[in-house]
Each structure stands twice: as structure tokens, then as C-alpha cells.
């Protein structure tokens, strides 16, 4: 194979197929077709469909094997002994081939022997049109019939052939006879006619195929005289102006007949059909399918009225060679050919007769261009192109003028779209003569940028796409010299759409049109260089188009100003906020290409637009001014040479801008949020640019930032924080502002203490985090205390000794995990900003210790609300902060206790239940272990380096099956195993099946491989349970975890060891956890663990007594669960209990067959009987209402 062939293969997309690889598999499936009633048919048919659907994008790969596939299927269908179910299945299989390859290709491969006609006809007559489950059978039979009716013999002769007796033997491959007699009364012609009428009247998929069959059947020479008029009259009779139940198949059949029939055969019926279809008034209403058939019928009636011809006056381009165009040769020859074609008017000696009906046809098509249906407008546009091609020049010119008149601002967007499509179709056929270009190109530019608001949405996407199609058609239709005066306009317009349009399909359409124009015309400036950059894939990403491709195009002077003007005039005030933001960034990059134009023209225009009442335009202008100002200031201070772009007047106007907004109350109401966002961005850019400002300007900027920090919108707060960071770094570092700076810090500390709204606290805390070092150091202790206090829950802070929280923190603030996340992040930023050098820094141990202890507590936050485990945000922020600090701080500040707590915290989080948190913790733990220089005080560091890979990216941290086996190896290390077990208990004991599966498998595999460690691990499980007793976050999954652990059989040796207190401890802790039985879910979850302890002989009696108590509780769910679980345990472990074997069967029967949902007065006697059979004392209450109830029950039993 040559190198070029290798390169071609490498460039093919990965999903490109080369041949029909599954041929043998498909043939095997066809050979083993089951009846549709079979149990396996649905699964096998789905598999067959899945295989063939792979070739939907490359259906031509089936062509070499089409005859083989069809022969196998039709061979089965023709079998005489084939059941109806199998025949329906075979037709379903055949339909899938038709769907993938299209029926127009498939029908060419279908057999058309005369012997098949009667077979197919009888099969069709036997079908029930209302049997919707097997519609594929009718569909394929109608398709087969459409090729059979094309036989060259007169249809009446076939009836005589069938009337002869058939004495030939029938074999397996010949057509089966579906009836015991030949129908000699009704001829085949009439039977097919009736079938066409029947299936054209069904509003389903088969009606389309019936229309196709009608078109093939009624145009036969021996049929048209007998049945064509009858069929058309029947359709006309079925559809009148007052018809409600419209049959779309009948309309489609008429349209198909008009398409495939000969003009001389259809001309006698044309006027009647036109009068009928117009009188039906199908163009009204919202039924687009009805209107689409209406348009097709009308345009084809017009084509019947006009003789087929090519307009002699049409524009003829001449040579279409791309090589010639690219080399710009033979331009003169092309020109002469085009002019000759354009001036060759009415050379035909034959006079063109235009019937009166054509005027009505064209009027209907022009009206259809305004339709609300996309397909209708497209069909009407093609119809106008076809009809106009047969008209004389004068009439065609009137039609074109009518279409151009549609392109005016008073017409709706549907009309613009239809007109653009029609003009493109006319241009493709050479019917738009060059003198029209002066009128059309300005309208084309309007269509390229059409974008109008309609309520809360924008319309214009389809118009811009159609305008690109017009440009594509112009490039193929005209000579380069004819389009030369308009090259600048068209090329600039296409490039603007290709890089700045909001919709990806419009950008790609413009890119394709530009590439076509470059290839066909060859006179677009820098066309080759640009077309290789603006390819299909490059313009597919909006940000890349706006910021990178536009900057590349702007290096060419011909396109630079049009790009900038379009952004300023149209995109700055775009309805989509994301487009306005991208526009501002694009203007920033383009400012480096045309700084003088930006400073002298664009900035004044943007400043003037800030007075508008349009909030979108105002928002976009402020964003753009900030970006342009930053770019111009960068150029002014560039080392290439000082140059002034911003005049003093312009700087004054920029200084006064925000003050003007404040006076006009632009920051109030719903639009105020947008203004706050863009103003913050403007302040940030001006601060980065180090623009000269007045003290009054700084005051207004600070006021706006303060207002933004309390906004409910997160993006507005973040924008204000970013602006505040740059503002303080640029303007607040002078000595004269010490008093103002202190006032700001005190104000922000008070804002951080706000306990009314979470978003207010979040904004001020984030602002404290971005303060510069010179503002933090004098107030480090106060800022640090505030951030530490707000990084912890109220309970954590009180335990830590901050009594001040008791006065102002409320229960509501307990759920403010987002604010605590911001506080942790701000704490980290302050550590990075202040650093570890000098006075009032984190080199002081008390400050560093306070931060580390705060982060350790934050890693233990598990706040829950209706959003779920929102404490995970705080834990993730704390883990990230702890990693950043201990890997960057001086090692002398680290204590062994803190490092160990951080490491085990990471390990615990890495085996808990939230994937995102688990992935972050696992990655940080791995990176921390392998950090260079090595972090001190990490215990068992050598072993950890062996367990965790050097490359963190080699592990899929978000996938439980990758991470749990890794972290379960830590169970062999006593320093880490306890916290890892705590995390594992949360994962194994929760409800996610996949997580529980992978976590438990990893744990049990470790326990089976390390039997000597099981006793120590069981002791650590008891310690975890003991330390977190009554902490439901831990104990609730712990109950399920213990049940699964004991049932696994991995700790049987510990359970049977009488010297090991594990089983007794678990029983004791379980009893304490569910004491009082007030919480149903906890009591029910503990039952499984209690019942698992039945297998421990020394605890059996105590467990049975506890279960007897549960059987007497008032909760029905608890009683049922106890009966089920206890039955399973006793059936499994009856050999280790002291229960009399003679009673065991009766006990199991009572547990399984008794109705434990009955009232307590009936249940408790059953429970007491169970206690007697098990040899334990029945539960009794000593006093109170329960004792009275028990006494009443016992009395009642005694009486009975």
C-alpha cells in the first residue's frame, strides 16, 4: 500500500465503516427467523435492527449484498408451509433493510416476475389495514407491487393467464397458493385499483407507499384510460372544502401521479384538479402536512400546463472548472460565455404560450413562501424555480420581482426565509440575471444578519442559514467578473457570520459558502488562507470562533473594520448575555489590531449607547468599554514605544460613567443585577489597566462593589470580588488611605457576621479572602478569627471554645454550608497572600495551628438538607486547602499529630459514598504521599509509596472498582485502618447498590486474605461504633454494614471465639442504639444485625428475647421484618441454637404463616407462644400503661 493510501486511511473518522462486515451474522439471523408470537422474536429482531442501523450513515455498503439478502427473505416468504407469524416476521426484517437503504433503492432489487403478481395481490387482499402491529407487511407488499405493475404486458392478459388450470407441481421455492381457487370474477386491474384506494385512505405509513404505487400504476398505457380519471374523480369526491377527515395518502397519490405521469396524459385533468385543490382551502390552519401536499399538487399542475423546456434567456456561466478559477485563467472566456447566455433572449422560434392558470399557480406558490412550515416554504421555493424555468423572460422577471418585494421589514420572518430559499433556487437555475445583483446584494446582507427578538426568544437563525445558501448558489451561478463589485460585501458578510453567529449551523453554513466562493470565484481577498482556518470543525466551537478565528481574520485589513463594526452595531446589544460577554472579549483582542479606530470611533459610540433604555445594549457596552480600555492601556505602556490612545476627555468620561449610573438608579430592580455584573467587570478591567481615576470615582466604585457583594446572584458576587481584588491592589496601597482601608475591613467583618442571609455572608467573606497583604497584616488576628469562626458549624465553633457564637448564630446558619465553603477558601487565600515571612504572618505557630485545626474540623462536616449532603462542599474545600498548605509551608511548622490527622482524613473521605468527594480525596492523598520534597511525619511512608502509584492519573479515582481495592490495603496498617473502616462502613451500609458491591467485595477480599488481622479490625469496628453511638450519620449505615459483614462469613472465627468480646460488644451497642424504639427506621435496620447474632451460641437466648420484644411492638413494619429475618436466621443456624428440634418446625411455620399485621391484642399471644416454643421467657412490662395492656391481653387469653 502506498504512503498516500496510508495517510487517507489515517484521516478517516473512527466510526467510518469499510464493508458490510456482519453479512454472515445477518444471513444467519434471516435463516433462523422466529414467528412474531415467539418468546425470542423481540430480542432477535432488536439485535438484527441494531446491526443494520450501524450502516444508516453508509447505506451503500449494503448494495453488493442486497440481492442476496432479499433472495433469502423472499425465499422464506414464498414458502407454502410458512406460518403467518413467520411471514410477518420476514416482512419486518425486510422493512429494516428498506429503512436503512431507502425504498427507492430497494425496489430496484426486488423481483418482478409475473408469477409474483398474483401472490402479492392475494397477500395484500388478505391483510387487515387496521392491524397496526404488522404494518410493515403491508408496506413492503405495496412496495413490491409498485415494481410488479411495471411489467410490459397488458394487464387484461394476465387475467386470462390465471384462468388456465395450474397442473404444475409446487415446490418449496415457488409461490405458495394462499387460496383454494382463482378469483375469475374480478380482474387484476380492478383489484389493484381497489387496493390503491384502500391503502391511500389510511393515514399511516402505508399511505405513502400506496401513493407511490398509484403513481406507477395509473400512468400505464393500458390503465390511464380506464382508471386514471376514475381515481382522480374519487379523490376529488373525498376532499371538498368542508372535509374534516383529510386523507393525506390520497393527496400524496395525486401529487405522485402528477410527478411521474406524462404531460399529455395529465393535461386534460389539470384545470379540474387546480380548481378542486384551490377550492379545498388547505392552506389555512396549522396542518402543515396537508398544506405541503397542497403545494406539491399546485406546482406540479403548473408544470403540466407548461411544456418542458429550458429558458433560453437564462444565465449561462460557461466553464465550471475549479482549477481554472483558482489559477484565475480564462476569465475573459468565461465572461464572454456568461454575457452570451445572459443576452441570448427569446432566440427560440417557438412562441411560449402561458395558460391563465399559471398566474394562479404562481400566486399560490408565492403565498406558500410565507407559510409557517419549513418544509412548505422549501417545497414552494423549488416549485417556483421549476415553473419559472419554463416561463418567458418578461413573466419570469415579474415573478422574481414579486419575490424580491417579499424581502422588506414589514414581512414576517417566515416570508424572509421562503424568499431567500426561492432566490437561491432561481440562482441555481441561472434565472437571476446579473443586473439583479445590485438590488439583491443589499437584501442578502440584511438576511445574513437577520436577528429579531420575539418575546423571550430570537428568530432569524433559519433566515441566516438560507442567506448562506444564497451565497453558495451565487458562487456556483455567476462568473467572477459579475460578482466582482460585490466581493467585499459578500466575503465580509460570510466571514462575520462564520465567526460571530450565535448558532453553530449558521457558522458552518457561512464557512461552507465562503469556501465554495473561494473555489468557484477565486477573487475573495486572502480566500485560501482564511478558508483553511474557518473549516467545519474550527467554527463549531463558539468561543474559538469569537476569540481565535476572528483575530486571525482581522490581520487582513480588508476584513478588520467590518468585523469590528458588526460587533459594535449588532453583537454588543445581543439578547444573549453569553454573546455579549464574548463580544467584549473579542473586541479586546481586536483592539490590538486597530487601536486608533477603537479609540477614535468605537469608544465614543459605546459611551453614547450607555444612555439607551435597552438593558442588553447598556450591559454589553459597559463590558466592551472595560475590555477595550484594558487593551488600549496595555498598548500605551508597551515597551515598543509610548503612544497615547485614551485622551483626557475620554478618561474623564470613563471616570464619571458609574456615578452617572448611580444617579439614574440603574442598579435597582431586575435589570440592576445585569448592571452590577458588567460594572464590576468594568472596574476590574480599569484597575488592571491602572487608569487614572479621581477620589470621587473610587468612592463610587467602592459603593458599587459593596452593593454587589450582597447580591443573591453568585456570578455577580464573584465578579465584585474579582474587581475588589484588583481595585485594592492598584489604588488602595497609598499611605493616605489607611483610615479608609480600616473602615472597609471593619465593614466587611461586620458583613461576614450577618446572620440574616447566607449570600450576604458569602460575599463579604470572599472579599476578605482577596485583601492584599498590606491590608491584612495589621488586622490579621481579627480577620483570621472571623474566617475560622465562619468555617465551622455553630456546634463545632462552640466546642472549639468560641462562646461569642451563642449570641448571634441561629439554627438557620447551621445549614449555611456554602458560606462555610467560601470561608475555608478565603482562609486558604489569606495564608497564600500573607505567607510565612515577617511579623503578623503565618510563621507564628498560634496562627498556623489555628488554621490547621479549623481545616481538620471542616473536614468532619456532614450537614444535610433537602439538597443532600451539602457538607461535602466544605469537606472538599478543606481537603484542597489542607493539601495546598502542608505542601507549601515550612516543614518546621508541621506537627506529627496534624499531618497524621490530615492524611487519615483524606483516607476516610476516599472510601465514603460521594463519588466526587471520594475522587478528590483519593487524588490528593496519592499526590501528598509522593510530594517532593517529602512532607514530614507521614507514618508508614515507605509502605504508602508502595500502595499508591507515582502517577495519580493512572487511577480512575471516580470509579469505586478502581479505588476501594487500593484503600483496603491500608487496613493492614494499624495507624490508618480505623478511619478507613469508618469510611467503609458508610459506603457499604448505604443504599447505592454498585458502591456497596465494590466496597464490600474489596473489604471481604482483604479479610479473607489476611485472617490474622480480622480480630484487630473487629475491635476497631467496635471502637468506631462506641465513639459514634447515637450519631445517626455513622450508626445508621453501621447497622447495615454489620449485618452484611457478619453474613459474609469472613469474621466467623471472631464470632465463635468465646474469649473475644466482639459479639457481646456489638449486641450491647445495638441495644443502646435502639433503646426506646422511638425511631422506626433505626429499629428496623437493627433487626438484620440482631438476627445474624443468632449464630453465636452464647448470645442466642438474648437475641431471641430481644426479637420477642420487637415482635410485640406496635409498628407493623418492625414485626414483619422480625418475622422474616428471624425465620431466615433460624432456618440457617438451627444447629447452633438450644431450641428443641421438635419445636423448630412449628416455630418456623408460625413465623412464616402468621399474619403479623394484625392488632397487638392478637399478635402478642402468638409471640408468647413462640417464646414458649423457643424456651425463653415472654417479655413483660413492670408498670404503666404497657403493664395494664399486657394484663388485659393475658386475661383475655385465659378467658378464651
Image (tube, rainbow, N blue to C red):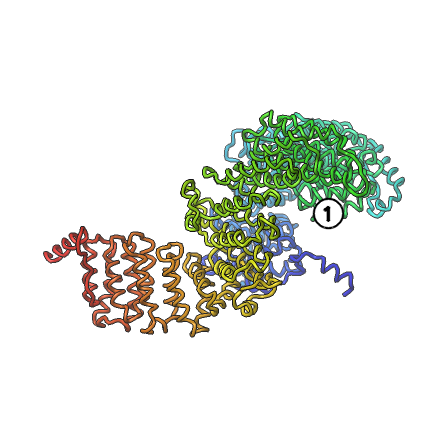
Total numbered labels = 1
Q: Secondary structure at mark 1?
A: loop
Q: Residue furthest left?
A: 1199
Q: Which residue is mark 1?
A: 535
Q: Is residue 1003 left or right of residue 892?
A: left
Of residues 267 and 1109, the one drawn nearer to the viewer in this rendering: 1109
Q: Is residue 69 left or right of residue 1024?
A: right
Of residues 577 and 234, the one drawn nearer to the viewer in this rendering: 577
Where is residue 287 drawn, in percent x and y?
A: 55, 34
Sort mark 1 into few (<14), some (14-19) or many (20+) by Cα contacts within 10 Å. Answer: some
Q: Residue at x 53, y 42 (%)?
A: 765
Q: Residue at x 17, y 56 (%)?
A: 1182
Where is residue 179 drawn, in percent x and y?
A: 49, 55
Of residues 1193 and 1025, the one drawn nearer to the viewer in this rendering: 1025
Q: Quadrant of residue 978?
A: bottom left
- Residue 943 visible in image: yes
Q: Is residue 74 left or right of residue 450?
A: left
Position of residue 70 relative to residue 388, above or below, is: below
Where is residue 316 drawn, in percent x and y?
A: 82, 38
Q: Quadrant of residue 616?
A: top right
Q: Quadrant of the N terminus?
A: bottom right
Of residues 579 and 919, the one drawn nearer to the viewer in this rendering: 919
Amino acid at each position: 500500500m502506498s504512503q498516500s493510501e496510508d495517510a487517507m486511511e489515517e484521516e478517516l473518522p473512527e466510526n467510518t465503516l469499510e464493508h458490510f462486515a456482519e453479512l454472515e451474522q445477518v444471513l444467519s439471523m434471516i435463516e433462523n427467523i422466529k414467528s412474531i408470537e415467539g418468546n425470542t422474536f423481540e430480542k432477535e429482531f432488536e439485535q438484527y435492527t441494531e446491526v443494520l442501523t450501524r450502516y444508516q450513515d453508509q447505506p451503500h455498503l449494503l448494495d453488493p449484498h442486497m440481492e442476496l439478502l432479499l433472495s433469502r427473505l423472499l425465499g422464506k416468504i414464498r414458502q407454502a408451509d410458512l406460518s403467518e407469524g413467520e411471514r410477518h416476521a420476514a416482512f419486518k426484517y425486510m422493512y429494516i433493510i428498506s429503512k436503512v437503504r431507502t425504498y427507492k433503492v430497494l425496489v430496484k432489487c426486488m423481483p418482478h416476475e409475473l408469477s409474483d403478481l398474483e401472490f402479492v395481490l392475494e397477500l395484500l387482499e388478505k391483510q387487515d389495514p387496521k392491524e397496526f402491529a404488522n404494518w410493515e407487511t403491508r408496506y413492503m407488499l405495496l412496495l413490491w407491487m409498485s415494481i410488479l405493475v411495471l411489467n410490459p404486458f397488458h394487464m387484461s392478459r394476465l387475467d386470462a393467464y390465471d384462468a388456465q388450470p395450474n397442473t404444475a407441481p409446487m415446490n418449496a421455492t415457488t409461490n405458495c397458493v394462499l387460496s383454494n381457487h382463482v378469483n375469475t370474477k374480478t380482474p387484476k386491474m380492478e383489484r389493484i385499483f381497489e387496493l390503491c384506494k384502500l391503502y391511500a385512505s389510511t393515514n399511516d405509513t402505508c399511505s405513502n407507499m400506496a401513493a407511490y404505487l398509484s403513481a406507477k400504476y395509473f400512468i400505464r398505457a393500458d390503465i390511464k384510460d380506464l382508471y386514471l380519471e376514475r381515481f382522480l374523480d374519487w379523490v376529488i369526491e373525498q376532499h371538498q372544502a368542508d372535509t374534516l377527515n383529510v386523507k393525506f395518502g390520497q393527496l400524496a397519490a395525486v401529487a405522485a401521479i402528477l410527478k411521474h405521469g406524462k404531460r399529455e396524459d395529465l393535461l386534460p385533468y389539470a384545470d379540474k384538479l387546480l380548481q378542486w385543490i384551490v377550492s379545498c382551502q388547505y392552506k389555512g390552519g396549522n396542518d402543515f402536512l396537508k398544506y405541503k401536499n397542497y403545494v406539491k399538487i399546485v406546482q406540479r399542475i403548473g408544470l403540466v400546463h407548461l411544456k418542458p423546456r429550458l429558458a433560453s434567456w437564462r444565465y449561462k456561466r460557461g466553464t465550471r472548472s475549479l482549477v481554472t478559477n483558482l489559477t484565475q485563467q480564462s476569465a475573459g472566456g468565461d465572461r464572454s460565455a456568461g454575457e452570451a447566455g445572459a443576452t441570448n433572449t427569446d432566440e427560440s422560434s417557438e412562441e411560449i404560450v402561458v395558460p391563465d392558470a399559471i398566474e394562479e399557480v404562481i400566486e399560490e406558490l408565492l403565498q406558500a413562501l410565507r407559510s409557517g412550515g419549513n418544509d412548505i416554504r422549501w417545497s414552494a421555493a423549488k416549485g417556483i424555480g421549476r415553473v419559472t424555468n419554463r416561463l418567458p423572460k418578461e413573466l419570469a422577471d415579474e415573478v422574481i420581482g414579486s419575490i424580491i418585494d417579499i424581502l422588506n421589514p414589514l414581512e414576517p420572518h417566515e416570508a424572509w426565509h421562503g424568499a431567500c430559499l426561492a432566490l437561491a433556487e432561481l440562482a441555481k437555475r441561472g434565472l437571476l440575471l446579473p443586473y439583479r445583483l445590485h438590488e439583491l446584494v443589499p437584501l442578502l446582507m440584511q438576511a445574513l444578519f437577520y436577528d429579531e427578538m420575539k418575546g423571550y426568544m430570537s428568530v432569524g437563525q433559519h433566515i441566516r442559514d438560507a442567506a448562506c445558501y444564497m451565497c453558495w448558489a451565487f458562487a456556483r451561478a455567476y462568473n467572477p467578473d459579475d460578482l466582482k463589485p460585490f466581493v467585499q460585501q459578500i466575503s465580509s458578510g460570510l466571514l462575520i457570520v462564520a465567526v460571530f453567529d450565535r448558532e453553530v449551523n449558521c457558522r458552518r453554513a457561512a464557512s461552507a459558502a465562503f469556501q465554495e466562493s473561494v473555489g468557484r470565484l477565486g477573487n475573495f481577498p486572502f480566500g485560501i488562507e482564511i478558508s483553511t482556518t474557518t473549516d467545519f470543525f474550527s467554527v463549531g466551537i463558539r468561543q474559538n470562533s469569537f476569540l481565535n478565528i476572528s483575530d486571525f481574520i482581522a490581520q487582513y485589513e480588508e476584513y478588520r473594520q467590518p468585523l469590528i463594526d458588526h460587533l459594535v452595531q449588532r453583537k454588543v446589544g445581543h439578547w444573549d448575555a453569553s454573546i455579549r460577554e464574548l463580544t467584549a472579549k473579542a473586541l479586546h483582542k481586536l483592539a490590538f489590531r486597530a487601536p486608533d479606530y477603537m479609540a477614535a470611533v468605537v469608544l465614543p459610540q459605546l459611551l453614547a449607547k450607555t444612555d439607551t433604555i435597552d438593558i442588553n445594549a447598556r450591559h454589553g457596552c459597559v463590558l466592551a468599554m472595560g475590555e477595550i480600555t484594558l487593551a488600549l492601556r496595555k498598548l500605551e505602556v508597551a515597551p515598543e514605544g509610548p503612544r497615547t490612545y485614551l485622551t483626557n476627555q475620554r478618561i474623564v468620561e470613563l471616570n464619571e460613567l458609574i456615578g452617572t449610573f448611580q444617579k439614574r438608579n440603574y442598579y435597582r430592580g431586575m435589570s440592576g443585577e445585569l448592571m452590577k455584573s458588567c460594572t464590576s467587570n468594568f472596574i476590574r478591567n480599569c484597575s488592571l489597566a491602572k487608569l487614572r481615576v479621581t477620589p470621587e470615582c473610587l468612592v463610587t466604585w467602592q459603593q458599587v462593589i459593596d452593593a454587589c457583594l450582597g447580591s443573591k446572584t453568585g456570578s455577580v458576587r464573584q465578579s465584585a470580588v474579582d474587581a475588589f481584588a484588583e481595585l485594592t491592589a492598584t489604588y488602595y496601597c497609598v499611605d493616605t488611605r489607611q483610615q479608609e482601608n480600616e473602615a472597609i475591613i471593619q465593614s466587611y467583618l461586620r458583613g461576614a457576621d450577618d446572620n440574616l442571609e447566607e449570600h450576604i455572608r458569602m460575599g463579604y467573606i470572599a472579599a476578605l479572602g482577596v485583601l492584599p497583604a498590606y491590608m491584612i497584616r495589621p488586622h490579621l488576628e481579627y480577620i483570621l478569627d472571623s474566617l475560622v469562626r465562619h468555617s465551622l458549624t455553630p456546634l463545632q465553633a462552640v466546642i472549639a471554645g468560641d462562646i461569642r457564637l451563642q449570641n448571634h448564630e441561629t439554627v438557620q446558619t447551621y445549614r449555611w454550608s456554602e458560606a462555610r465553603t467560601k470561608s475555608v477558601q478565603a482562609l486558604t487565600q489569606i495564608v497564600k497572600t500573607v505567607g510565612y515571612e515577617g511579623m503578623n504572618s503565618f510563621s507564628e505557630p498560634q496562627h498556623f495551628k489555628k488554621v490547621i485545626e479549623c481545616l481538620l474540623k471542616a473536614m468532619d462536616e456532614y450537614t444535610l438538607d433537602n439538597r443532600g449532603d451539602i457538607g461535602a462542599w466544605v469537606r472538599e474545600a478543606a481537603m484542597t486547602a489542607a493539601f495546598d498548605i502542608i505542601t507549601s509551608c515550612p516543614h518546621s511548622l508541621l506537627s506529627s499529630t496534624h499531618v497524621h490527622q490530615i492524611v487519615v482524613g483524606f483516607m476516610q473521605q476516599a472510601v465514603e459514598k460521594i463519588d466526587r468527594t471520594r475522587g478528590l480525596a483519593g487524588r490528593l492523598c496519592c499526590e501528598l504521599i509522593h510530594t517532593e520534597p517529602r512532607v514530614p511525619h507521614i507514618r508508614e511512608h515507605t509502605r504508602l509509596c508502595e500502595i499508591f502509584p507515582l502517577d495519580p492519573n493512572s487511577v480512575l479515582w471516580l470509579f469505586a472498582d478502581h479505588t476501594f481495592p487500593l484503600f483496603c490495603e491500608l487496613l493492614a496498617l494499624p495507624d490508618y485502618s480505623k478511619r478507613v473502616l469508618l469510611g467503609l462502613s458508610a459506603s457499604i451500609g448505604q443504599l447505592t447498590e454498585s458502591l456497596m458491591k465494590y466496597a464490600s467485595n474489596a473489604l471481604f477480599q482483604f479479610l479473607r486474605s489476611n485472617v490474622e488481622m480480622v480480630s484487630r479490625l473487629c475491635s476497631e469496628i467496635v471502637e468506631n461504633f462506641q465513639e459514634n453511638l447515637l450519631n445517626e450519620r455513622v450508626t445508621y449505615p453501621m447497622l447495615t454494614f454489620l449485618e452484611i459483614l457478619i453474613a459474609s462469613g469472613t469474621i466467623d472465627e471472631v464470632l465463635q471465639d468465646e474469649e473475644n468480646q466482639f459479639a457481646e460488644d456489638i449486641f450491647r451497642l445495638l441495644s443502646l442504639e435502639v433503646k426506646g424504639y422511638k425511631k422506626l427506621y433505626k429499629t428496623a435496620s437493627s433487626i438484620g444485625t440482631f438476627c445474624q447474632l443468632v449464630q453465636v451460641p452464647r448470645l442466642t437466648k438474648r437475641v431471641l428475647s430481644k426479637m420477642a420484644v420487637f415482635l410485640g411492638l406496635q409498628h407493623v413494619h418492625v414485626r414483619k421484618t422480625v418475622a422474616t429475618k428471624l425465620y431466615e436466621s433460624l432456618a440457617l443456624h438451627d444447629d447452633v441454637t438450644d431450641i428443641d428440634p421438635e419445636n423448630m418446625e412449628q416455630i418456623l411455620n408460625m413465623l412464616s404463616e402468621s399474619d403479623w399485621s394484625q392488632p397487638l391484642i392478637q399478635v402478642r399471644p402468638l409471640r408468647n407462644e413462640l417464646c414458649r416454643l423457643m424456651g425463653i421467657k415472654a417479655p413483660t412490662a413492670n408498670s404503666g400503661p404497657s403493664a395494664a395492656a399486657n394484663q388485659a391481653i393475658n386475661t383475655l387469653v385465659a378467658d378464651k
